[in-house]
Image (cartoon, helix red, strand yellow):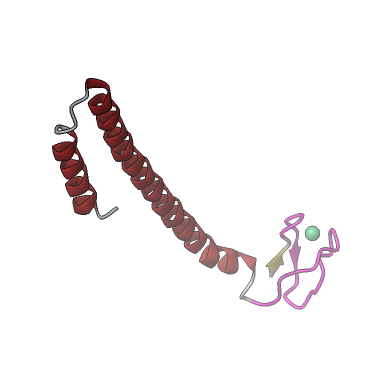
Amino acid sequence: MITCTGCGRKNPDDARCCEGCGRKLQSGRFGAPQESGGTRPLERFSSGSMSDAARSELWRMVEAWGYVAVVLAALGACLYTGRLWPLYPAVAVVALLLWLRKI
Ligand SMILES: [Zn+2]
């Protein structure tokens, strides 16, 4: 027995088209339910891991630009006050953070 995916009518196993609506029927036992059931979890898994990777990549970009902003702020403060020596430890700390985070 083949159940039509269009109208739900039950058709004989040897029927090629639905007797109710004329839609082409999936042949044999390897019909639509098994096929879609096999591909859907895989698609969901791959799309989920893709978005996770994109999100972590975006977060790393935000973090890297945050460090750049800190360096620029320190540079601006040093230029404003006319003292450059506090800039060096700030740059060193940011460079260490970048190295630790492998950005
Ligand atoms: Zn039908």
**Residue 81 higher or lower than 41, as above or below:** above
**Residue 95 higher or lower than 21, as above or below:** above
Left or right of residue 54: residue 38? right
Residue 32 is covered by the magenta coloring:
no
Residue 15 is covered by the magenta coloring:
yes
- The residue closer to the viewer here, 25 or 64, is 64
Residue 48 position, x and y percent, is 44, 53
Left or right of residue 101: residue 28? right
Residue reaching furthest to the front: 82
Badge count: 0
Left or right of residue 97: residue 11? right
Q: Residue at x 72, y 56 (%)?
A: 8
Residue 26: image quadrant is bottom right
Residue 82 position, x and y percent, is 22, 24
Residue 93 position, x and y percent, is 16, 42
Residue 91 position, x and y percent, is 20, 41
**Residue 83 higher or lower than 60, as above or below:** above
Residues in magenta? 5-28
Ligand 1 visible in quadrant: bottom right
